[in-house]
Amino acid sequence: RALAPLAPRRSVTPIVAAIEGPGAGAGVATRAAPGEVKDIAQDWQLDFCSRPMKDERGKKMWELLICDETRSFEHSEFFPNNRINSVELAKAIDRVFVARGERPRRFKFFRSQMQTIITRACGEVGVNPLPSRRCQTMSRWLDERLETVYKTHPGYDGSAAPNMGFEGGGGPRPLPDALRGESWAFVALPLVGVKEEAEQVRANRVFGDLLEIDPTLEDDALIPGIAVYTRRAAALAGWTKGLELGGISVDFDMGTLLLDTGVSDSWQYARFRQTKELTKEAREWEEVKAAVNGLHFLAIQTDEDAETTDGFWILQDFTQAQI
């Protein structure tokens, strides 16, 4: 399926090499007994942080939340503030594995300040931790629980400061030259076309990564994207698969596309001339993205006339939970 252009083809700055979360690919031992828990090729999402509630001692309460990426299952568990450590967290995670009889490939989480505890606990239970902005499912669940659980608790503290989230990495950085596209363009597909590309990713025919799409969106809704063209599309897509992509946005002051990865990194992905025409196209692209709640995509293919892609990522601007 050809991608509809939103702007002329233009040259691309270097794009690049894999950035993996801590522990990715590392061999770690599991504490579950053999035969009790099977490994599954799925990612789950995890949040472990204090909540705006106090217990009967007047101490802040903490909570562990675990779900898969469609919330087909959910686990919630409160912790007193004297049990906030990686050992207690690993025990709780282990109990979830035994109860479900399965262990995911990775745990995604978005609170960078909790990275040490979460990484150590994941090492104990044999799951790779992955700092990620692709935690929209968890963020939505937290917002729901704020209204249905936390605010109804007798110890709710509405004056509590907002909780920790991801921290910026000190501004966008230029990417190394390990990978380079030859040109790029603002493009768009109707949602039905995005779903067709997603099926290619699910079937492992192309590199990429997917997110759950709002089921209320109509199939003819226009989804904006960035298309990168290169004769080395397969190689570029393969390396990009090593990135935990968050989203792409336009920095109008710099005339730059910014690519967010992990929970704290931002990269100067591509540049455009800040002419009146190109700036207008960039603003229109951001407006189309805002109209579909930040949903967008990255496509990598050989040229603008190609009917197939070598890489396809569904992205969404990450709105952190209110707590």
Image: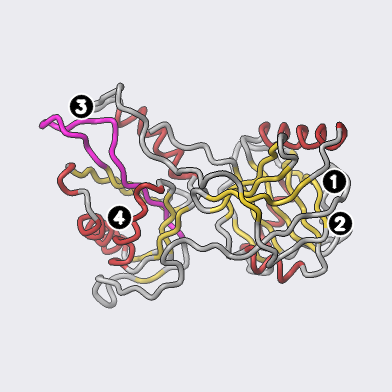
Q: Classify 10 Å Cα crowding around label 4: few (below 14), some (14-19), many (20 and above).
A: some
Image position of 82 (left or right of 302): left
Residue shown at 70% from the left, 62% from the top: 311
- Per the model, the C-alpha gap separating discs 2 and 1 is 9 Å
Residue bearing mark 4: 117
Residue shown at 71% from the left, 57% from the top: 197
Of the pair 136 and 261, the residue shown nearer to us: 261
Quadrant the N terminus occupies? bottom right
Q: Do the residues under discs 2 and 1 have CB atoms within 8 angstroms?
A: yes
Residue 161 % position (x, y): 33, 28
Q: Amino acid at mark 3?
A: Gly
What is the span of residues highlighted in magenta in the rendered image? 43-62
**Any mark on residue 119, and which?**
none
> In the rendered structure, which disc, 2 or 4, sits on the residue that comes first in sequence?
4
Q: Amino acid at mark 4?
A: Ile
Number of numbered tags placed on the structure image: 4
Residue 305: quadrant of the picture: bottom right
Q: Nearer the viewer, mark 2 or mark 4?
A: 4
- Per the model, the C-alpha gap separating discs 2 and 4 is 45 Å
> In the rendered structure, which disc, 1 or 4, sits on the residue that comes first in sequence?
1
SS at mark 1 in the image: strand
Of the pair 30 and 275, the residue shown nearer to us: 275
Of the pair 9 and 179, the residue shown nearer to us: 179
SS at mark 4 in the image: helix
Residue 198 % position (x, y): 66, 56
Residue bearing mark 1: 5
Residue bearing mark 3: 155
Residue shown at 44% from the left, 54% from the top: 108
Residue bearing mark 2: 304
